[in-house]
Image (cartoon, rainbow, N blue to C red):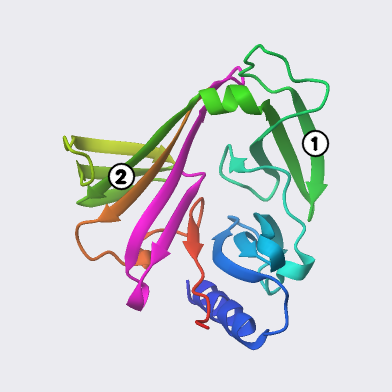
Amino acid sequence: MKCFKTLLFLIALFLNMSCDFSWKISELFVQKIENSSKVIYKYDAWGGRDSHKFGYVILDSIDVFDINNAESLPFQYFETIPTKQNISGVICEELDGQITPEKIFIPLKIKNSEEKGIKIKAKIFQNEGFVLRTQGYKQYQFETFKESRDSLFFYNLNDITSMEPEHLDILKFKKTNIFIRTKISNIVSEISIEDLKVSQKDEIISNIRYDLTPKNKTKISSFSNIGIFKEVKLPKD
């Protein structure tokens, strides 16, 4: 845990010292790959003339993230928790010559590659079919949570934005596309989750975005570093 905190400090220090890069990073998250020296960064940045750059990058934990040399992984969503052997992800694209009026919910193709000694599998879905299975956005405030090796459980949730608030006893998410933001003193301010569900036959079932806020003060250290992206605090202008 101390090594991971040191890594976050070094990243922030480097970003504070690097004033000449052309990209302005708006958000940066990091996740550790279990039993490995590798980490994954999720970045979002803006450049001149509203140019936009975002994605995921694998680096060794002793290396400092540099957006100018970032080689992004070929997908938008993780399908499983990354391991030191394999990473599987999902992307939706409009592919020339393969777009038809029919909505397709299984991969149009699968691309295999390798990055930093890790096998990468990217499942490419038809954009129209993927969007059709995307089922909106939800916001809840949770009272408590529990973490297992591959999942997060949130309890006693209240919808705090709808005209007709909904109460849920529990929500369960697999640890894939989970991003924790913090405020001062490493206190959790928000947990964003892209709850992507893909069947065993590789069919897109659903994709729902959740933003969860804790009812009680919750430290980011209460969550593990595996299967969860944690925010790296950026220097203020």
Q: Is residue 101 magenta?
A: no
Counting residues from the start of the chain, the first of labels 2 and 1 encountered is 1
- Which residue is depicted at the point 35% across and 58% down? 190
Residue 197 sits inside the magenta stretch:
yes
The residue under label 2 is: 139
Residue carrying label 1: 112
Work out whether 11 lies above or below 147. Answer: below
Identity, as a three-letter code, of the amino acid under mark 1: Asn
Residue 100's quadrant in the figure? top right
Image coordinates for residue 221, horizontal then vertical, percent? 38, 67
What amino acid does circle 2 point to?
A: Gln
Within 10 angstroms of label 2, few (less than 14), some, or many (20 or more) residues?
A: some
Is 197 situated left or right of 166 in this image? right
SS at badge 1: strand
Residue 211: x and y, percent? 36, 48
| Extent of the magenta region | 175-204
- Crowding near the residue tagged with mark 1, few <14, some 14–19, many ≥20 C-alpha atoms within 10 Å: few
Q: Is residue 18 above or below residue 137?
A: below
The picture places residue 11, in percent across and down from the top left corner, at 60, 77
Mark 2 and mark 1 in contact? Answer it, CB < 8 Å: no
